Amino acid sequence: MTKTIAFHLQKGGVGKTTISGTLACQSALAGVPTLLVDLDPQGNASSWFLSETPHWELADVVQGKCYVDDAIVPVTGIPNLFILPTFGIGGTLKLYSETKLADEPFVIQDLIQEFKGKFEHVILDLSPGLGRLEKSALIASDEVITPMTPEAFSLDGLEIFIDELAKLKKNFRSPIVHKKVVINSYDERIKQHRDIYKSAKKGNFRIYQIPVDPVFRKSQELKIAPQLYRVKGKGLKDRTLKAFELMEKEIWS
Ligand SMILES: Nc1ncnc2c1ncn2[C@@H]1O[C@H](COP(=O)(O)OP(=O)(O)OP(=O)(O)O)[C@@H](O)[C@H]1O
Ligand SMILES: [Mg+2]
């Protein structure tokens, strides 16, 4: 059965792309056919995993310019990982979401139906904000997981997101589940981080913690899976690996 997960908080730079991309690699490296859908007009996930600009992008698919199978590309060097890309330059997805998406809020939901039977795990990387595109992606997802950084503004953002998601669920009759939070760049030794963890915990969330790990940035520069990055025998921190192993185990079950 196909499960679709979106990683979202309307706040920018909290690790949405890093976490969705790394989890997609984790799933693919475990042998599961996995699709990462780049729903961010910035195209960060696509530039992370693709060395060349592909012929078609997501915006072409939703506008009927090509078939979805024409636009999905395999990621070189990571078996079982595929991406439905967005080109950061050109702004086609942004233009589409500003001009046409209002008339077709279920376009992403319809698109995801086409992945059934082809991919077991589908991960959506969204852009910051909570506009039409993000809403259409959320109503297409089985679950949304919120990445946040251990700071007060992220916590405020989580509260706003909970409120907005409740409205979305009601207005679109969406059964989307929101029970998990990832605190990114977490350091147990810092009191402020522990306080943010405690506050987030009050929302009854299952919380995962990811430490600051320079391998993410390096793997994004080198266009490889963070799990495959090695310099002098060193790769991701043990704590980072453990967090993703745990997420992989719990998120898809
Ligand atoms: N745990 C981490 N340790 C070190 N660097 C990290 C970590 N998580 C993310 N980063 C870095 O922080 C930057 C922002 O991360 P990322 O692009 O994933 O955030 P985002 O939420 O997707 O941003 P946007 O809102 O623009 O889409 C990137 O350069 C990334 O490499
Ligand atoms: Mg991003």
Image (tube, helix red, strand yellow):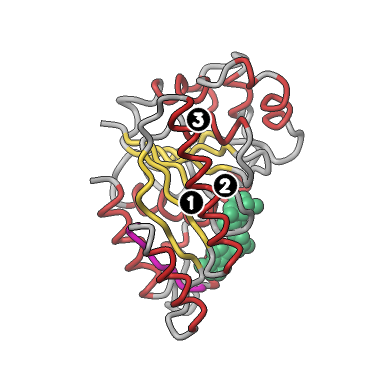
The residue that disc 1 covers is: 21
In front: 40, or 161?
A: 161
The disc labelled 3 sits on which kind of residue?
A: Ile
Which numbered disc covers residue 72? Answer: 3
Per the model, the C-alpha gap separating discs 1 and 3 is 16 Å
Answer whether labels 2 and 3 touch (C-beta < 8 Å): no
Q: Secondary structure at mark 2?
A: helix
* Relative image position of residue 4 (x, y in whole percent): 38, 36
Mark 1 nearby-residue class (10 Å; few <14, some 14–19, many ≥20): many
Q: Earlier in the sequence, mark 1 or mark 2?
A: 1
- Residue furthest bottom as drawn: 189
Per the model, the C-alpha gap separating discs 1 and 2 is 7 Å
- Residue furthest right as drawn: 90
* Relative image position of residue 78 (x, y in whole percent): 42, 49
Answer whether labels 1 and 2 touch (C-beta < 8 Å): yes
Q: Is residue 206 magenta?
A: yes
The disc labelled 2 sits on which kind of residue?
A: Ala
Q: Secondary structure at mark 1?
A: helix
Mark 3 nearby-residue class (10 Å; few <14, some 14–19, many ≥20): many
Per the model, the C-alpha gap separating discs 2 and 3 is 13 Å
Q: Secondary structure at mark 3?
A: loop
The disc labelled 1 sits on which kind of residue?
A: Gly
Is residue 207 rendered to the left or right of residue 101?
left
Disc 1: residue Cβ within 8 A of ligand 1's nearest atom: yes
Instruction: Classify residue 98 by image quadrant.
Output: top right
Q: Quadrant of the N terminus?
A: top left
The magenta segment is 205-212
